[in-house]
Image: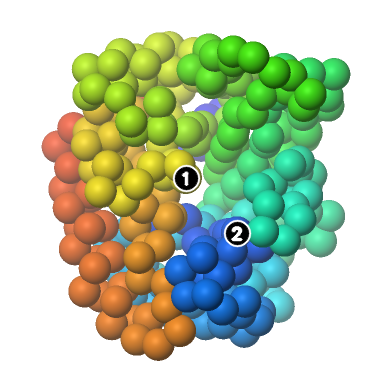
Amino acid sequence: MPQDLSSIARPSGAFAMVAADQRESLRTIYRDGTGILVGDEVLRAFKRAAARVLSPHASAILLDRLYGLRADLRAEEVDPDCGLIIAADSLVQLPGEPVTDTDLDAGLDPVVARTAGAVALKLLVIWRDDAERDRRERLAGDFIELCRGGGLISIVEAIVRRPVGSYGEWDREAAAREAAREMGALKPDLYKAEMPFLGQAEASVMADASRQLSEAAGGPWVVLSAGVRPDRFEPAVEAACQGGASGFLAGRAIWSDAVSIERVEQRLTEVSVPRLERLGALVDGMARPWWSARRPRP
C-alpha cells in the first residue's frame, strides 16, 4: 500500500524540501567557495545551522548519518513540524569528484531511524545503461522493501550518467525518462529526478520534458537542484510543476551561496530563507498535489 506522504508535504500537497545530505560534495563546495579545505566539524556545523534556519520553512529536510545527525540519528535542530528524511545511501566518491556509485548504508537501521523521528529514507542511484543496470535496479528494490518493512516513506533519486567509456552523442533526456520508467516500476513512494535540461532550456521545453517524466515515473515526483544555477532554479521548478512535478527536494540552489567560514546563519537567514519561502509559495500554487499523482492501490 502506498505511504501517506503528508508528513513530508505542505498542506497543499506540494513538497518544499531541503536536501542537506551532501558529504564530500559539501567539502568541495566549501573549497570552491572559500579556497579552504575544511574539516568534518565545519561540515557538521553547516548542517546544524541549515537545519535550525531552514527547517521551519521546509516541509521536510534530508540529512545524512555521517555529518548531519547525532550518533543516535536524532536531529535536535530540526523544527518539529518539518519531516525528517535520512539518507540511506553509502556513496562511492573520491575527494573533489562526483559520486560514481552507491550502495545501501549497512549501518542504518530503519527501526532506529523511525524511533529517532525519521519519517522517510532516501536512496541515490547512479543510473547508467550498462552491465550494472540490473544490480542497481535490485538495489532500489531492496531499499523500497526495507522502507516498507520499517514503516518509512521510500524516496528513490536517480542521477543519470553516460556509460563509462562511451563517447560521442548521448541523449541525457532520453536516459532520464528511461531511469524514471525503471525506478517508477518499482513503486517507490516518491521519485526524485534531475531537472530536465538542467534548467537551461526554454520554459515550454522544460515543461514538456517534465510531462514526459511524469508519465514515465507513474507516481509523484520532485526535482533536485544539482546542476541548476540558483538564479535559474525558480523558473525551472515552475516549468517542472507545469509538467506535473509535485515540488522539489533541493540543496545547492537553496543554500550554496550561504556557504562560508563565518556568518553562516546570517547568510542562510538573509539569502536562503526568502528563496525557500518563494519556492514554497510557487509549489503551493502550481505543483500537482501528491495525492493526485499517487499510483492506484494494487
Mark 2 vs 1, N-terminal side: 2
Residue located 85% across and 18% down the image? 131
Q: Mark 2 is on which residue type?
A: Ser
Residue 73 image position (x, y, % from top left): 65, 71
Q: Is residue 204 above or below residue 40?
A: above
Query: What amino acid does circle 1 point to?
Result: Ala
**Discs 2, 1 touching: Cβ within 8 Å:** no
Name the disc covering residue 207, or none.
Answer: none
Picture mark count: 2
Q: Is residue 69 visible?
A: no
Compared to residue 144, the image places residue 61 above or below, namely below
Residue holding disc 1: 226
Residue 195 occupies quadrant: top left
| Residue at mark 2 to residue at mark 1: CA–CA distance | 11 Å
Nearer to the camera, 156 or 233: 233
Instruction: Measuring from the top left, give residue 271's x and y in whole percent.
Output: 24, 68
Q: Please tell me which residue is depicted at 52% across the width and 70% down the height of the picture.
A: 30
Q: Is residue 193 left or right of residue 187?
A: left
Q: In the rendered image, which quarter contains the N terminus?
A: top right
Q: Position of residue 70 (x, y in %)?
A: 64, 78
* Occupied quadrant, residue 54: bottom left
The residue labelled by disc 2 is 25
